[in-house]
Amino acid sequence: MFNVVLYEPEIPQNTGNIARLCAATGCRLHLIGPLGFSLQNRYLKRAGLDYWDMVDVYYYDCFDDLKAKHSKGRFFYVTTKGKRFYTYFDYEPGDFFVFGSETKGLPEKLLADNSELCVRIPMVPAARCLNLSNSVAIIVYAALSKQKFRGLS
C-alpha cells in the first residue's frame, strides 16, 4: 500500500521494529545504504521477530537509485524541519515516506530540493525528535487512516 524509506539507518532495533510494522500493515520497506549495521545483526532479526518473511524489503546503494526506479512516485520527507504537519496531505496508495538516520536526519540538500513535500510531527519546542520507529508508525497509520484502513482488519 505505502512505501517506507529509511535513509542510512543506524540502529538495528529500529529497523527491525519498522520491518515488523511494514509486515503488519502491508507497506514495502526500502533501505538506503550505507546501513549502520549488518543485515545479519541479531538485534535486527530479534526486533523483526518472525515477520521478516511477510515484508518486502528493497536495498539501494543511494537515494538516487531509489528515485530512478520509482521516478513517478510521490515522495514525502519526514523531518523536524518540515513546514507542514503530517496531517496536511491526503496520502495515496504507493506514496513514499522518507525518514532520515537516527543521528543525522535527512541531508539538507534533499530537504531544500523538496521543501514543499517535507512534513513534520508536532512536538513541544524543547524536544529534539521522536524515536525513528515511533515516527514511522505515526506517519504510516495516519496515511492508512486516510485510506480507511483498507485491507486491514
Image: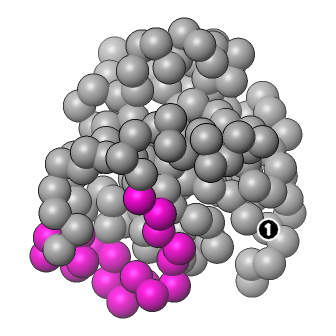
Q: Position of residue 22 (x, y in %)?
A: 53, 68
Identify whether 59 is placed above or below 5: below
Q: Which residue is mark 1?
A: 149
**Magenta span: chief secondary structure:** helix
53 inside magenta stretch: yes
Q: Identify the residue at horizontal 67%, vertical 37% (top origin).
A: 75
**Would you say residue 77 is visible in this rendering?**
yes
Secondary structure found at label 1: loop
Q: Identify the residue at horizontal 52%, vertical 17% (top origin).
A: 111
84 inside magenta stretch: no
Quadrant where the N terminus lies?
A: bottom right
Q: Quadrant of residue 88?
A: top right
Residue range corresponding to the magenta coloring: 41-59
Q: Position of residue 89 (x, y in %)?
A: 80, 33
Of residues 93 and 67, the one drawn nearer to the viewer in this rendering:
67
| Colour scheme | one colour
Q: Amino acid at mark 1?
A: Phe
Of residues 45 and 24, the one drawn nearer to the viewer in this rendering:
45
Quadrant where the C terminus lies?
A: bottom right
Q: Is residue 6 left or right of residue 101?
A: right
Q: Position of residue 151 (x, y in %)?
A: 80, 78
Of residues 42 and 138, the one drawn nearer to the viewer in this rendering:
42
Q: Identify the residue at horizontal 17%, vertical 74% (top origin).
A: 40
Identify whether 1 is placed above or below 93: below
Question: Within 10 Å of the Cα at label 1, are there few (<14), some (14-19), or many (20+) other Cα atoms?
Answer: few
Q: Quadrant of residue 87?
A: top right
Q: Identify the residue at horizontal 46%, vertical 38% (top origin).
A: 63
Q: Is residue 21 left or right of residue 32?
A: right
Q: Is residue 31 left or right of residue 119?
A: left
**Would you say residue 130 is visible in this rendering?**
no
Q: Position of residue 98 (x, y in %)?
A: 53, 40
